[in-house]
Amino acid sequence: RDRSVSRGLGDVYKRQAAYFMGIAFAPSMGVAYAFAIVGGIANSFLDTGIYPAVSEIIYKAPGVATMGIKFFIAIAQMLLPFVLGATVATTAAGLTSYNRLFYGCGIIYLVLFVLVFLFPLPDADQMAAGKKEGLIDSLKHTHFSFESIAMILIGFTCTGTFQLWLNCAQNFAKENVGWTDPSIMQTYYSAGTLIALVVTALLTRKIKDVRFIVIYPVICLATLIVVLMGQNQTLMIAGAFIIGWAGAGGLLQIATSVCNMLFPKIKGTVTALVMIASSLCNYTCLLYTSPSPRDT
């Protein structure tokens, strides 16, 4: 076991703790903005570091390992509204404050910071090769085939599928289906995501991960076409569940896992490439799906 991975993740946890505590104690908007930038950078490094680290710990089933991360993300997303309700407070000035949530998250990251040093993570790459290449050198010495580039671009396309649904489906239901309150679709979407993570994790023990990368996007495409043509509440509910399952139910994590298997010596680098593609999609979707000034 080597402590280099532990030190890297420890630095990320430390910065995340600084972000949460800094936001809570920030004396001005400018200081809070600076800590928000630190938190955004740390979160990006966290994505890049966690996936390969967990894949090395559970090396016999890397697909299951990465979907486990997504499972806990989905759980957190479901619990967040309840946590917000439990931690909201009113200041002496009568303002709404969520500082207790920031304190709690900051403390959790400090605990994780300590744990990664008490239980150092395995560094299989360093044990096997002795010396690691830097980011630029690793990219120079790596041959990216058409298939591997397509795998990385899955980070963009699969993110686009569920981001478009999350940002557009409810408006589509109101305007085209005549559904007054389609918010229930979010519940079916979340249910599809959670069930898919468990079922897909079990299926990956018997079915190759790469097959899901072909099957799930095809299911998403067929679902979107049916919803666009059918335009009724039943199809919208079914579409929410299916997109939650096939679009957000671990496809990005499976793609990351497959990329890590294709490039075992640069897991962090290739994970970063997938996540960069995903982040670019998030930005693009939010840019083009947000209402224009003429619509508001």
Image (cartoon, helix red, strand yellow):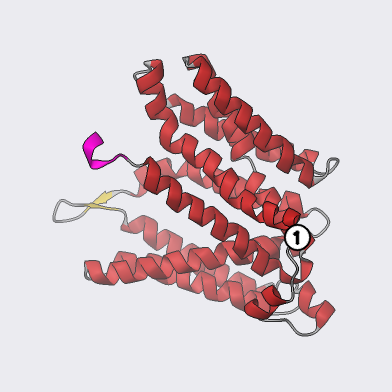
Quarter location, residue 268: bottom right
Q: Is residue 110 left or right of residue 103?
A: right
The residue nearer to you, when weighing 10 against 259, is 259
Quadrant of res 115: bottom right
**Residue that badge 1 annotates:** 145
Tell me: 64 left or right of 75: right
Residue 158 within the magenta-colored segment of the rendering: no
* Residue range of the region highlighted in magenta in the rendering: 291-295
Query: How many numbered dots are placed on residues in this image?
Result: 1
Secondary structure of the residue carrying numbered label 1: loop
Is 3 or 267 nearer to us in this picture? Answer: 267
Q: x, y percentage for residue 53?
A: 69, 65
Q: Is residue 79 left or right of residue 243?
A: left
Q: Is residue 293 magenta?
A: yes
- The residue depicted at 73 percent of the width and 81 percent of the height is 132
Compared to residue 162, the image places residue 259 above or below, namely below
Identify the residue at horizontal 59%, vertical 72% (top origin): 9
Circle 1: residue type: Ser
Q: Position of residue 40 (x, y in %)?
A: 44, 64
Q: Which quadrant of the rendered structure holds the C terminus?
A: top left
Q: Is residue 111 above or below residue 209?
A: below
Whole-percent x and y of residue 159?
A: 55, 46
Q: Quadrant of the N terminus?
A: bottom right
